[in-house]
Amino acid sequence: MRRSRVLVHVLLALGALGMVAPFIWQFLTSLKTLHHATQVPPTLAPDWRWQNYAQIFDLIPFGQQFLNTVLMTGARAIGQVLFCSMAAYAFARLRFPGRTFIFGIFLSVLMVPPQLFIIPQYEIIARLGWLNSLPALIVPGLFSAFGTFLLRQFFLGLPVELDEAARLDGANPLRIWWSIMLPLARPGLVALGILTTIWSWNDFFWPLVVNNDPEKMTLSAGLASLQGQFMTDYPVLMAGSLLASLPVIAVFVVMQRQFVQGIAFTGTKG
Amino acid sequence: MAWIGRRAGALLGVAALMMATAACGGGDTGNDDPNAKVTLSYAVWDKNQVPAMQQLATAFTAENPNITIDVQLTPWETYWTKMKAAATGGAAPDVFWMNGPNYQLYATNGVLAPLDEKIAADKVDLSSYPQALIDLYTVEGKHYGLPKDFDTVGLWYNKELFDAAGVGYPDATWTWDTFKQAAAKLTDKSKGQYAIGANLSSAQEYQYNTIFQAGGSVISADGKKAGYADPATIEGLKFWTDLIKDGYSPDLKTMTDTVPLNLFESGKTAMYYGGSWNVAEFTANEYTKTRVAAAPLPKGVKSATVIHGLVNVVSAKSAHPDAAWKFVKFLGGRTAAEQLGKSGVIPAYNGTQAGWAAAHPELNLQAAFLDQVPNAVAYPISRNTAAWQELETTYLTPAWNQQKDVAAAATELAKAMDESLAKE
């Protein structure tokens, strides 16, 4: 009995180490010289070059890009929760002609690889005159077919009697959505919010394509610009990436329970 | 997965460019007032050259106070995908960097403004640039860009390992035979040390050079037929597969895990076929800084090195074509070239290159890279270069893995490449 528990703990500890190893490696690399970072066979020992961290702030407008990333992530998360829950409520409860058909078209969006949207989206943004701006980062991420689908399934699981009771009391659909559905759907909304946050924070390609000015870029795109064609200073890049992932790690530590529930609930991590 | 993604991306890009052509009818006729305030966007992909580009932009604005330049950096990995989106969306930068493999695709799809009339009107002398570079960027007799810089390939070597093995440093007298004799002495498997990494991931640094040295070709001059069935070309490929077979190079699997550049930078290989662009890396790395130097590539039937370079091009949809041309002309001129040479790349303008080599006399750059220009052969391209470059990797991998005879692999490659070229 005791021995098997020890075994379980050893196994779990090994598993945990395996999961944390890339972060430890990243941290150690961020403190190495370029030579030691690319050496074969690799060495573990860092050179304690803390100046790699200082260098990030000279190379890219880190503070401004951090702010852009926070604004983009926050606005997208709030927007998706709001708009997706509205659409999801309509698809789950309201009866209107062509509902199934429209929902089918909606779902078909999920079948298309997202890369295909890049060029048309770019053209739309270009014609709106929004290239190289904060709205260009935010607006295309405000809506999501996946979020709508997720919340619709959630709403379908709620008892219809609640709606009916509210309607008898004279509540209009907007009121029912706001006062009845949203409070009940909290776990689903939190899950969607968390997924959107992770996805937006990591979103790389769209911010890179649509914005040119370093002051208008997000951290993911800004860090990518540290890669040269023929030469990359990996220790500095690692230092920057580590700084960029700290906020997500902090959010995770604070909201660990919701994270795990949310991911278990949706069965995906985005 | 990444491979599939890249391939899908390439197809998407081609489709997008064709849409772009269909969408753009007549070209814009720019602003007539030469003194109106104008801002030009200038897209570049190398972070390390951004400071130099900013300096050139400032110098240009000093001469032309009404034109300011906005230098925009997109990292190499995503530059072309972004460019395709921008070109299709009609929002390509006014002026941007263009390379050989992408040139004909963009030029023949109407994304680039033809410059011949302007070159003639302003009497820009194209013989101021290496001929091979001008050839590379001539498509159907037309020019769409002015050369910015170029690079050639040389033999980098680790002096410490040469000293330890008692082998004399490589120089212009080296032939393939000298190279192989040295390779045998420089290989010490007990220490995990090899003479060189015979990789297949970068034809420009590896097999294209030896193909040309053997007197072979990659693609015919008219860009319609593959050169891989030519016995001379096969000799050029055999140079590399023999190195693996004889054990002077790690096998392909090892080099997939650790790229030859890192092996060389860790003292695990004594030599490295690399470009002039490696100067930046080798002088920044604490290990190579004091240990490496360069020499010309060993001679086969003849001397040859692959030359490639960039041109500055003007978007066909630029709202300010005249200002954009003025900037491109400035960038292609002697003053700009002299400044560019100080930033670590070889300027394309003839007679301005010596400064680049003089910055690191200990590396022997003049002999290794600049003196080779008369022997240089242009980087092979066609209208859809990416399509057959992928075939090269696919068909040659079994030969590099020693699973297939080189001649058989090359002959099959020639057939597949001919089919690909027929579709262009």
Image (cartoon, rainbow, N blue to C red):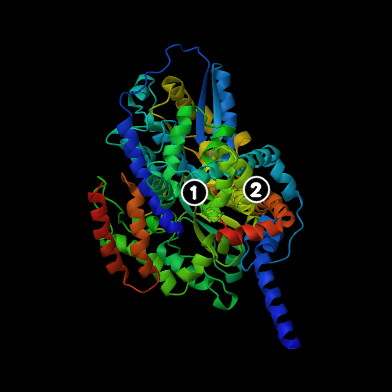
Image check: A81 left or right of B380?
right
> Alpha carbon of mark 2 to alpha carbon of mark 1: how far?
16 Å
The quarter of the picture where the C terminus of chain A appears is: bottom right
Q: Amino acid at mark 1?
A: Ala
| Percent of width and height locating residue B248 | 48, 71
Q: Amino acid at mark 2?
A: Pro
Query: Residue beneath label 2, please?
Result: A183
- Can residue B411 be seen by looking at this rendering? yes
| Percent of width and height locating residue B295 | 51, 55
The quarter of the picture where the N terminus of chain A appears is: bottom right
- Mark 2 and mark 1 on one chain: yes
| Percent of width and height locating residue A162 | 58, 49
- Can residue B372 be seen by looking at this rendering? no
Element under label 2?
helix
Image check: B10 left or right of B222?
right
Image check: B19 left or right of A29?
left
Relative to B105, residue B71 above or below: above
Relative to B139, residue B394 above or below: below
Q: Which mark is residue B216?
A: none
Image check: B352 left or right of A257?
left
Residue at image point 26% right, 59% down: B416
- Which chain hosts label 2? A
Based on the displayed image, in which of its 4 quarters is residue B178 positioned?
bottom left
Q: Nearer the viewer, residue A196 or A202?
A: A196
Based on the displayed image, in which of its 4 quarters is residue B355 positioned?
top right
Residue at image point 41% right, 74% down: B245
Dot 1, crowdedness within 10 Å: few (<14), some or many (≥20)? many
Q: Which mark is residue A92?
A: 1
